[in-house]
């Protein structure tokens, strides 16, 4: 029997300075220090890189040499459409057409960078594209601007996968691409093979979704391009160590990832403000690896039978078997 | 200048006995008593009828004579796929194929009834179609069963509009068609002219949506078939008197309904457990009529300018102007 | 080493008909049938009884003989202040003084019944005491009426413990005693030895509390009189089988229950609408028993060390150790 | 008839740089620039100052001269127990006793500063005092450490009012003093005349409270020392312009503030990240002033009658009268 094991990556931004609206945490680091930090994480095979925040286009050779030196693969490029002042009122849907073009151009560059780095995924999280107040937005225009932007970006290079990451809120009180349904609808509208979705498990929880259902609905359409892992209390994107709050959601997600044969990456996207970053990342991976082992030990068939029955009493028995004593 | 005014209906079920999980409220009523109750509501033009709960197929002539006597139009038929014991584990997605066929058949019958009554809308709210626990459902199968059922139903008579009403939860802890995005995706998948959506404003609030955004995204695709009106605290489908909690959401919704030229019905779907039912319905309508007048008085153009600017300070000024002193 | 094991009870109402606002589930049962149903649950030592819904004052001898026959102890009496039509706008805070007196009288009777049955706990859950709309209540008067009522009730017999059960909402959209803080404040105001709190773990989750924190703060004041167990998605009182959603919360609660030496009852208060009631109860108990074993195996000291460190990485390691593979 | 009008202040921190976890907004400003910014806000009488972030103890004379020059009163001093790196794992409940002493000392200094500035209120918002994960805290110890700290602080100078500001979450995923009930309980435990509460209306909404109820319960005990004003979607402390989301909550709060005769300050605590700061503050005040006028015009008695009846239909009529056309 072949047992599929997942590939884990870690966001490079975790190894620099982190902020919330009251404090900055951890000292700032330069690119090599961050890469060195990431390279020490047990259990990872790759990194997710924020472009162009972590390195500029003309630093690509330096970056390549660094990741070669530290033996890291690039799992995904996430385009920074949220952390630069110019995007503060929107990027791909900015009312300022010059800003909007710049956002589109940055995404295209990120695709070139991805290709150059042998990375298949460019992750687009439009955190600033939305609105905050009632009567602030023309929702129809926002949708069209966003759809057109994604289509143009994806057309730039059909060999690079554009993975759209949805989120309910933060930094905007309302983000346009807020739920699995709207993300899939957008992907349908764009209708290109290389446009799909990043499922951030914490974002699904924040949007009051069952992450496993979202995962299956995305996968069913061939659109599960990328996964972000972290945990929260179903109320906000707290980005906690995975599985420390919602264990069963993770068990169910990993059953489906294995059953469906997901062969993409799982990126650690936690925010260990007050913790040792390395330890928090390693725990996240160790927890998911442990769940992988549990799924393998229980066996896909047993989960399938449980789902076929749909009987909560059998579900509870299975969960208790997993928990052990 | 032509000023559009909305058509209001009221759910017939409001005039009988209402329940929650602890109590029953109001005395039970027979069909004529309910119709008489509805007919007394100032400001309504029609009723929404639950089929076959409120009358059976062979009682259609009696029902027709009653609504003729009381001078009421049928705004929509809502198929009872949630309030009969047989649907307790699902209707259109039931694992029991016999039950599922019965659910589909009931929807088709409801379409025949609608046609016979001169009503264009059959509302399908699949409240029992979902699940409660992790590892309880094959989400992909649920989606396919649901899509196929809607397609079969809609094919039964392309002249009747099938309006799908989404809701996040209750009675199931997780309903399959839970959000505006998933509802539109499903409608896309079915891809038939006569399949669209019922926007329940309270359900949009419960799903943490901005109801006006949901409205616009549905309308944009020509799929806003029907509207349900009620209010809540963005936490649950409390079905309170409209506008008593979220005034600005209602103002924004009515701006868009008028600007887009919505010519369908707005059905009062409140649950006045502890109140005088007639008074609660009349207040709901009076509140929405008042908001209509406000939108007309302010003028579409002024709202549009506010939205074009997208400046919260101008928004606040407009809201204060609406509020007056 | 002495290992404390918990005493489990089950709500007698689970063995009759259950409702939500759309459906009734399970056939109705008479008193003996319900008691028989409860008596079959593996792992319970007692029942919680709703008075006077399940039997009237003059049926007490019959009830005593039944529980004797079925070998059951009465863990708690819950006063029905929510499921009779007369309470629909409030019980202990009713504006109708006649209704309010009746509610107080019912509580006193329940205390007499409790004493007669050898039961120490009368549980008061004021689900109808609150309000639904803005500008509907004089919050200060509500507080005073409630405080006075509890004081009068508790004075009736200082040998019976009056346990106040808080809940955020449902059936009212806002219940007066909504959170652990307000419940403890009320208990402080009443200031009687026999007035304390029922912690319903699901209610704590619904109120966005960490149940373990609420438990500790109540226990610290000597006020943890009773515990109700069930689970949900932190959004509503879904009353699911315990531990099927929030495993770690249950682990943390049981660590504290054992560490603090709680010697009261844990009552199963789930609502198995679509499930086999017996199976759902037995799973709830089996899950909690299993967690008891885990806590014993890990050892109180190890949990304490984890808490003393407060390091999320150590927490994650401990959780992974508990999960095993 | 004497009509009470409220005193408005504005947080001085609004006039400098604001951050979220992705971006910084607005240019940094020095003390005089901030004070100048605040002084331009139409409708304010005072400022709330963050100490020692905005000026140090030895800069007090300079600060005094500045506010004299700009004609501003100090409404409240908020102690910075959240925005300095040393507090990142707690301030008044820090496990590091040295840090905890420093936090207490800072509060005492803030009291001295307040006195020196003729300000009666020191606001303590312990945003870092809580925890993030299950099994991370000894809740009983946290409570005791916090209570003891507040008692020691309040004892430092009984002529200065110590106002405790509760909040559910952020920056910690769980803050210790999270709800109105816990805040009042803490105040009860400390039991000193000069210890009371700051009601942040947005925090009450975030905690799923009805702000007017929280206000009344605090006032009833003579503990409403201070008020912060801002708005959100009942889901997070978004700090939006007041009344732009929850109009009726503000109407109800201002009815009670006037009826009860609140003579303290109302501080604007919004976060206008993407807006003109001055405009956003002025709109917040203009909106509240407008609601004051409405309450005066409707008249206290009419609100009282509405509350005495408690009839949602009358409530709706009153709200519609307020809205006008």
Image: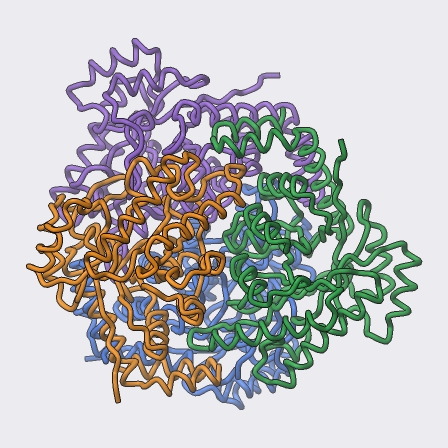
Chain colours: A orange, B green, C blue, D purple
Percent across and percent down for residue C65 are 57, 87
Percent across and percent down for residue A63 are 13, 52
Would you place residue A200 above or below residue B41 in this image? below
Quadrant of residue C84 within the rendered picture: bottom right
In the rendered structure, the answer to whether residue B42 lies left or right of residue D184 reads right
Would you place residue A92 above or below residue B21 in this image? above
Percent across and percent down for residue B198 are 65, 57
Quadrant of residue A269 within the rendered picture: bottom left
Q: Closest to the observer: C16 or B211?
A: B211
Would you place residue C268 above or below residue D175 in this image? below
In the rendered structure, the answer to whether residue C153 lies left or right of residue C247 reads right
Q: Residue furthest left?
A: A69
Percent across and percent down for residue D287 are 52, 27
The answer to whether residue B122 of the structure is visible from this angle is yes
Instruction: Identify which residue is drawn at 46% across, 32% down.
Output: D241
Instruction: Identify which residue is drawn at 63% across, 39% down.
Output: B255
Q: Closest to the observer: D158 or D284?
A: D284
Instruction: Specify the quadrant that holds the C terminus of chain C.
Output: bottom left
In the rendered structure, the answer to whether residue D129 lies left or right of residue A62 reads right
In the rendered structure, the answer to whether residue C324 lies left or right of residue B90 reads left
Instruction: Specify the quadrant that holds the N terminus of chain C.
Output: bottom left
The answer to whether residue C228 of the structure is visible from this angle is no
Q: Closest to the observer: B60 or C162?
A: B60
Q: Closest to the observer: A90 or B117?
A: A90
Instruction: Identify which residue is drawn at 46% across, 61% down.
Output: C203
């Amino acid at each position: 029997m072949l047992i599929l094991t997942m590939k884990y990556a870690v966001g490079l931004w975790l190894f620099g300075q982190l902020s919330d609206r009251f404090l900055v945490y951890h000292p700032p680091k330069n690119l090599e220090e961050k890469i060195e930090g990431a390279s020490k994480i047990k259990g990872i095979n790759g990194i997710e890189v924020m472009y162009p925040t972590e390195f500029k286009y003309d630093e690509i050779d330096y970056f390549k040499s660094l990741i070669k030196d530290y033996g890291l693969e690039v799992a995904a490029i996430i385009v920074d459409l949220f952390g630069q002042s110019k995007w503060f009122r929107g990027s791909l849907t900015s009312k300022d057409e010059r800003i909007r073009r710049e956002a589109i151009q940055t995404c295209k560059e990120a695709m070139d960078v991805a290709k150059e780095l042998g990375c298949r995924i460019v992750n687009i999280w439009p955190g600033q594209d939305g609105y905050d107040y009632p009567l602030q937005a023309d929702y129809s225009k926002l949708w069209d601007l966003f759809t057109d932007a994604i289509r143009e970006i994806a057309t730039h290079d059909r060999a690079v996968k554009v993975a759209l990451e949805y989120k309910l809120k933060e930094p905007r009180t309302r983000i346009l691409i807020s739920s699995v349904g709207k993300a899939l609808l957008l992907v349908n509208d764009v209708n290109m093979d290389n446009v799909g979705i990043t499922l951030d498990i914490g974002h699904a929880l924040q949007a009051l979704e069952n992450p496993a259902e979202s995962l299956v609905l995305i996968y069913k359409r061939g659109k599960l391009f990328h996964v972000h892992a972290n945990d929260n209390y179903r109320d906000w994107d707290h980005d906690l160590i995975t599985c420390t709050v919602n264990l069963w959601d993770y068990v169910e997600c990993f059953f489906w990832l294995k059953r469906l044969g997901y062969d993409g990456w799982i990126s650690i996207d936690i925010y260990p403000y007050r913790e040792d970053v390395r330890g928090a990342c390693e725990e996240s991976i160790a927890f998911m690896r442990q769940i992988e082992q549990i799924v393998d030990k229980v066996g896909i068939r047993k989960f399938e039978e449980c789902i076929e029955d749909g009987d909560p009493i059998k579900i509870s028995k299975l969960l208790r078997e997993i928990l052990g004593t």
